[in-house]
Image (cartoon, rainbow, N blue to C red):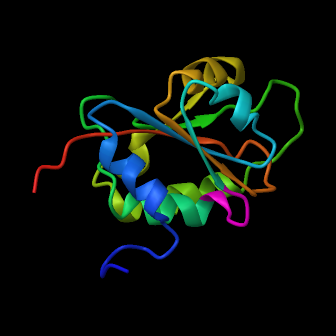
Amino acid sequence: MLKGIPKLLSPELLKVLCEMGHSDRLVIADGNFPSESIGKDARVIRMDGHGTVEVLEAILQLFPLDTYVEHPVQLMEVMPGDPVETPIWAEYAETVKKYEKRGTTAIGTIERFAFYEEARKAYAVIATGETALYANVMLQKGVVTE
């Protein structure tokens, strides 16, 4: 055990976060996301018993977001005509505001199929048990400056 590390973060996930370099991407996927097929060329970390908000909260305590891009946090857009509500996005906004000095301006959206394409290039995919729809988040890593 280590002090100051969120207990939710497994040794496997900590190793992956440490291995990642500037501009590498990490996907925190909801339970419906095709994590294994999208992440077949990446590392897939199973966190089935956890939700995306708690995983995002734990990761952002250690993970610097990229300051060289406008939106280092990307959410999957709702498909046009899909009547799904996304109240979880407000929880993401509150979480990002706690750890990112740009606040919610660091959050952007990306069309669903473009999100899948970008996720295929991610360094790692975290497969959660999140049941909210359109609850996928992609983070782009920055540099540690302190």
Q: In which quarter of the image is the C terminus?
A: bottom left
Most foreground residue, 103 or 16: 16
Q: Image point 85% across, 42% down: which residue? A: 84
Q: How many marks?
A: 0
Residue 144 on image: x %, y %: 18, 49
Q: Quadrant of the N terminus?
A: bottom left
| Residue 119 found in image quarter | top right
Q: Image point 51% across, 21% down: which residue? A: 121
Most foreground residue, 52 or 73: 52
Most foreground residue, 69 or 49: 49
| Residue 35 found in image quarter | top right
Does residue 32 lie above or below 93 as drawn?
above
Stretch of the chain drawn in magenta: 47-52
Q: Image point 27% across, 40% down: which residue? A: 142
Residue 6 on image: x %, y %: 43, 74
| Residue 13 colored in magenta in the image | no
Residue 58 on image: x %, y %: 46, 66
Residue 89 visible within the image:
yes
Does residue 48 lie above or below 21 as drawn?
below
| Residue 50 colored in magenta in the image | yes
Residue 96 visible within the image:
no
Residue 40 on image: x %, y %: 64, 27
Considering the whole magenta stretch, tell me its main secondary structure: loop
Does residue 91 lie above or below 77 as drawn?
below
